[in-house]
Image (spheres, rainbow, N blue to C red):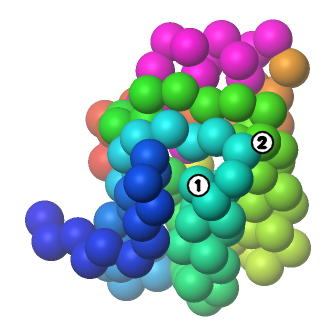
Amino acid sequence: MFYEPIGECMSFQISSEQIGDVAILQCHGRLVRGEAIFTLREAVTAFPDARILVLDLTGVQTMDGGGLGMLTMLHRWTRDHGTALKLVNPNAFIRELLQRTHLVCVFDISSVDDVVE
């Protein structure tokens, strides 16, 4: 797979690939308040015509309230644009954060194997 780097800051990087109407964003680093969340916003909004947008969180080590807020805002943005947002492979900390904030019922969260099927 070839991923094109589309956003980068000191602690957070995103690579992207689009296959038809599916955009895959591979995220790496710390999704925390500051430049990282704006990098994520720019990356997601760069695909307004995607039918499915997959955020691969495999490489995300941690997330704070700013990252959580940005994910929530992007969920609404994708919904308003008719795009399905899928979160893939969040680590145990991020999954617990989503559970404690009751956002597991808002987001479509899965493993890579689930998305491929």
The answer to whether marks 1 and 2 mark residues whose Cβ atoms lie closer than 8 Å is: yes
For the C terminus, the quadrant is top left
Rendered residue at 56%/14% (across/down): 93
The relative height of residue 43 versus residue 68 in the rendered view (above or below) is below
Q: Residues within 10 Å of mark 2 (few under 14, many from 20)?
A: some
Residue 30 appearing in the image: yes
Report x, y in % for residue 53.
Answer: 54, 64
Q: Give the quadrant of residue 61.
A: top left
Give the structural element (helix, strand or loop) at label 1: helix
The relative height of residue 75 versus residue 42 in the rendered view (above or below) is above
Amino acid type, label 2: Gly
Q: Which residue is mark 1?
A: 36
Q: Give the quadrant of residue 39.
A: bottom right
For the N terminus, the quadrant is bottom left
Magenta segment range? 87-100
Q: Which residue is mark 2?
A: 66
